[in-house]
Image (tube, rainbow, N blue to C red):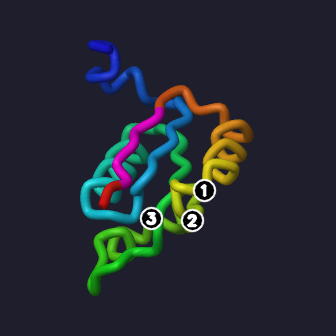
Amino acid sequence: MENMVKEAFWPGKKVFITGHTGFKGSWLAFWLLHLGAAVKGLSLAPNTTPALFEQLDLAQNLSHHIGDIREAELVARLIASWQPDVVFHLAAQ
């Protein structure tokens, strides 16, 4: 776990983020992309105007999927196809 704090850990890592369109998820995706990670996200559509997700133009820089994490088949399919090295679960409500 302590290696994840080092910048050298992230280049080329495949990361899956739930809640990537929210405020915290957007910042996390932005930083991980900056550090060289490949990012895939699953989330509901942004629900604020303006939305940080849209302001950072993240849909152009990561594999972006709109959906509900309560759809177990969707989550399983995305994770199985992506085979991430790291998963961050930030979806909430």
* Residue at image coords 52%, 55%: 69
Q: Nearer the viewer, residue 69 or 29?
A: 69
Question: Which residue is pictured at 51% across the width and 67% down the height?
Answer: 59
Q: Which x, y percent locates residue 71?
A: 60, 56
Q: CA distance from mark 3 to mark 1?
A: 23 Å
**Relative side of 31 to 85, left or right:** left
Q: Is residue 27 left or right of residue 76?
A: left
Q: Measured from the top left, where is residue 85 in percent x and y?
A: 54, 26
Residue contact at pointers 2 and 1, CB within 8 angstroms:
yes
Taking depth in this image into account, of 58 and 76 the one nearest to the observer is: 76
Label 3 secondary element: helix
Q: In the image, 59: left or right of 34?
A: right
Q: CA distance from mark 2 to mark 1?
A: 8 Å
Q: Residues within 10 Å of mark 3 (few under 14, many from 20)?
A: many
Neighbour tally class for label 2: few under 14, some 14-19, many 20 plus, Cα within 10 Å: some
Farthest residue, direction top: 2
**Residue under the point 29% across and 71% down:** 52
Q: Earlier in the sequence, mark 3 or mark 1?
A: 3
- For numbered disc 2, what is the local secondary structure? loop
Q: Which mark is residue 53?
A: none
- Under circle 1, the secondary element is loop
The numbered dot on residue 58 is 3
Q: Is 43 above or below relative to 16?
A: below
Amino acid at dot 1: Glu
Q: Which mark is residue 67?
A: 2
Chain part drawn in magenta: 87-91
| Picture coordinates of residue 37, whole percent (x, y) | 48, 38
Q: Mark 1 — residue?
A: 71
Quadrant (top left/top right/bottom left/bottom right) for the N terminus: top left
Q: Residue at x 45, y 46 (%)?
A: 17
Task: Based on the picture, tell me whether residue 88 belongs to the magenta stretch.
Answer: yes
Disc 2 residue type (three-letter): Gly
